[in-house]
Image (cartoon, grey):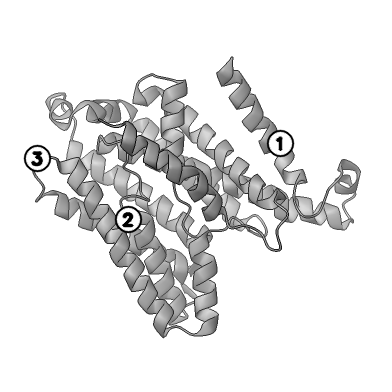
Amino acid sequence: MIKNIIWFTLLSILLISPFMGAVTLTLSDILDSNSFSSTIFFELRIPRVLFAFFAGVILALSGLLFQTIFRNALMTPYTLGISSGAVLGAGIAIKLGLGTLVFGISAISIFGFMGAMFTVILLIYLSQFLKGSQQQALLLLGIALSLFYSSALMIIFYIGSPMQNDMLIRFTMGSLSVIGWEHPLSLGVISFILFGAIYIYRFELQLLNLSESQASLKGVDTKKITLVLLIISSFAIGTLVSISGPIGFIGLIVPHIVAKLYPVTVNKRIVKTAIFGGFFLVLCDTITRTLQTQSELPIGIVTAFIGAPFFIYLIISRR
């Protein structure tokens, strides 16, 4: 019963979210193609809701993937510093004033992806020197990298111009504000690729969640699968962060909520985690658009406000 209520509530919010915001929209105004309300609905609200949904899918699946591969409930691209690496890469592109580089792709997107990939490669390399409580040590390495990236970003703030610093401040707070269909559609393709890769290797992930040695005994090439999935996930996170800025804690909260609602094996939670992540981020975005503030509240503040207490709860509850 509780599950049905939760899913019904999230689905209802997804359907009514395009009508909510600073400008109240009615169905009659939307159906008039020449009206201003119709332009807002189809060029701003619908693309934004879809962008939020696909972003939630990427963040939730990445969180589930990292927690499964590293067998640690606190592992996410955010806590491991991968999102911070993408932010630093995007910040470097903003500071250098780079525009479009290759095949019409934004320099911010390219540098964000490079920052995420560099962090993944560095974590994989450093993990070879870890012994004993490897997962806990890897989490501490991720936190250390995040602090280092934050320091490097502060240096960019210090040497940047006021206009560049304003762009960086707005970027680091996170935003799902998009215009048109370009970003939602591209993010939809990326989320589908990430979902497909995880679903294809769902049974291998189930074995990896138990133990790496047991997966190897079953004939699973653990290093290859881990590297492929981490690269795809980092590409998705790097692209998302380069567009929206960092959005924390979704990858931490959603997999655990789904695991509580559906205490089944990992391979049976993939679809539910993806959909729930999309619904949940749409809910957070709807909150930012409906609050009566002078300017729109950044999405990163809402997710951090919800996620930080949840993160503390996870740490305390682990014995």
The residue that label 3 is drawn on is 132
Amino acid type at mark 2: Gly
Residue matched to label 2:
81
| Quadrant hosting residue 317 | top left
Residue placed at 77% from the left, 44% from the top? 19
Residue at (87% x, 52% y) in the render:
33
Mark found first going from the N terminus, 2 or 3? 2
- For residue 84, which quarter of the picture? bottom left
Quick check: 50 above or below 259?
A: below
Q: Earlier in the sequence, mark 2 or mark 1?
A: 1
Q: Residues within 10 Å of mark 3 (few under 14, many from 20)?
A: few
Q: Is residue 81 left or right of residue 271?
A: left
Dot 1 falls on a residue whose secondary structure is helix
Spatial CA distance of label 2 from label 1 is 34 Å
The residue furthest top is 1
Comparing labels 2 and 1, the label whose residue is closer to the camera: 2
Q: What residue is shown at x 55% (from left), y 50% (from top)?
A: 302
At horizontal 38% and vertical 53% (from top left) the residue drawn is: 235
265 vs 174, left or right, is left
Circle 3: residue type:
Gly
Q: Residue 48, position in %: x, y?
A: 65, 51
Name the amino acid type tagged 1.
Answer: Leu
On screen, residue 312 above or below 145: above
